[in-house]
Amino acid sequence: MTTEDRAAALDTADPLGHVVDRFVTGGGVQAYLDGNSLGRPTRVTAERMRTFVDDEWGGRLIRGWDERWFDLPLTLGDRIGAVTLGAAPGQTVVGDSTTVLLYKLIRAALALRPDRTEIILDRGNFPTDRYLAEGIAEETGAVLRWIDPPFDGGVTADAVAEVISDRTALVLISHVAYRSGHLLDAPAITGLAHTHGALVLLDVCHSAGSVVLDLDGWDVDLAVGCTYKYLNGGPGAPAFAYVAQRHLDNIVQPIWGWMGAADSFGMAQGYVPAQGIRRILSGTPAVLGMLPMADMLDLIEEVGVEAIRVKSVALTSFALKLVDELLAPFDVELSTPRDPAERGGHLTVDHPAFREITPRLWRDGIIPDFRGPTGIRLGLSPLSTTFDEVRLGIEAIREELAVHPS
């Protein structure tokens, strides 16, 4: 069979193939392989936004805060928790950007462990996570304990065990590594951290909506994730924070604002935090920014995260086969674990020519992601990506390498 025939057979047999048409396409794109950076909008989102402008914003005006908007960060947070995180109600809230929520929860974690001074993190984590930890260390005097994961892998429990101690306040780590796609053994690392009295903060930006999460079952303490990747909330959509129920009475985040106060509309002198997960909020929530993700949550709930994960593994496995068949002769380097149990929903391939090649791919409607110094990252969003898109994308990379090998 040709690669085209193989891709067609996989698409025909795909039990989730019927949902691909529920996403907006166009713009001359032949293969969209960057859904783990920005997911496609669902087709129903345009109507949801129009109805909101006409009926809620235009019709209800300021009354909307009393009728729905004030509690939307909590109600939508509960949906995210139930549909994608394995989290019981009352522990997830939609709030600020990923960066701001990470800052809040790192500082809150240090406050929950005032007798400890160290944060464990890895040099393979997303830059924002690292930069935040560095800045907080400057602010608080905390000490950073660095892990250097392999380029084609990620952090393991053994690596954490080498640096953890009774001085560790927090282990800050991504569940799926943003570059390599390495999938963390979260239960093992959480168990290890708790044995030493430390807290765990998971960055689930590349996990939520793509792999199965069980934050409650894994006994995770804190988590933050974005909503514009696999939750398809749109560019700049607000992020979410998870705080385990056992910490809610005592957690104190450092950015005190009126929406996180016990009586937001009391306008009283002196800050008193709200009970429960609302205390993680600060300023007025981005109501418009929360609307699109609700449509994707409907779709995820309809098909189930378990089925999405099966499709994700199938997509990345097909991509790996094509990389081996079509790109290996050009001496590319796979920078992602081959074992599907150790990788999330994307993979990265490295070659010195990829920085130059990527803009030409974009020009031709093939949209992967470039990750320095030499990586093309293929983000395969399971509900909107077809196997034929994977085929088209990797064949286009091969054609570029044949013409521009270095």
Image: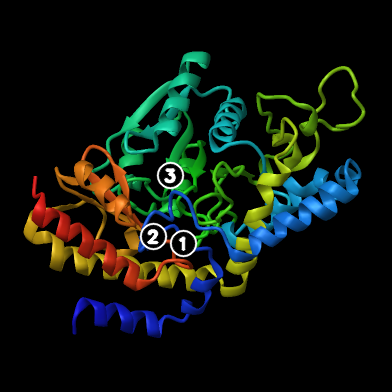
- Tell me the quarter of the image containing the C terminus: top left
Which quadrant is home to the N terminus?
bottom left
Q: Tell which of 385 and 349 is nearer to you.
A: 385
Residue 215, percent from left and from top = 56, 54
Q: Are marks 2 and 1 in contact (CB under 8 Å)?
A: yes
| Residue position for label 1 | 26
Instruction: State the image quarter where residue 295 is shown.
Output: bottom right
**Visible residue check, residue 160:** yes
Image height check: is 92 above or below 389? Answer: above
- x%, y% of residue 366? 31, 57
Is label 3 in contact with label 1 (beta carbons under 8 Å)? no
Foreground mark, 3 or 2, reads 2
Q: Secondary structure at mark 1?
A: loop
Q: Residues within 10 Å of mark 1 (few under 14, many from 20)?
A: few
In the image, which disc is placed on residue 146?
A: none
Q: Amino acid at mark 1?
A: Gly
Callout 3 amino acid: Ser
Q: Residue at x 21, y 65 (%)?
A: 395
User: Circle 2 sits on which residue?
Assistant: 29
Q: Which sits earlier in the primary sequence, circle 3 or circle 2? A: 2
Residue annotated with mark 3:
174
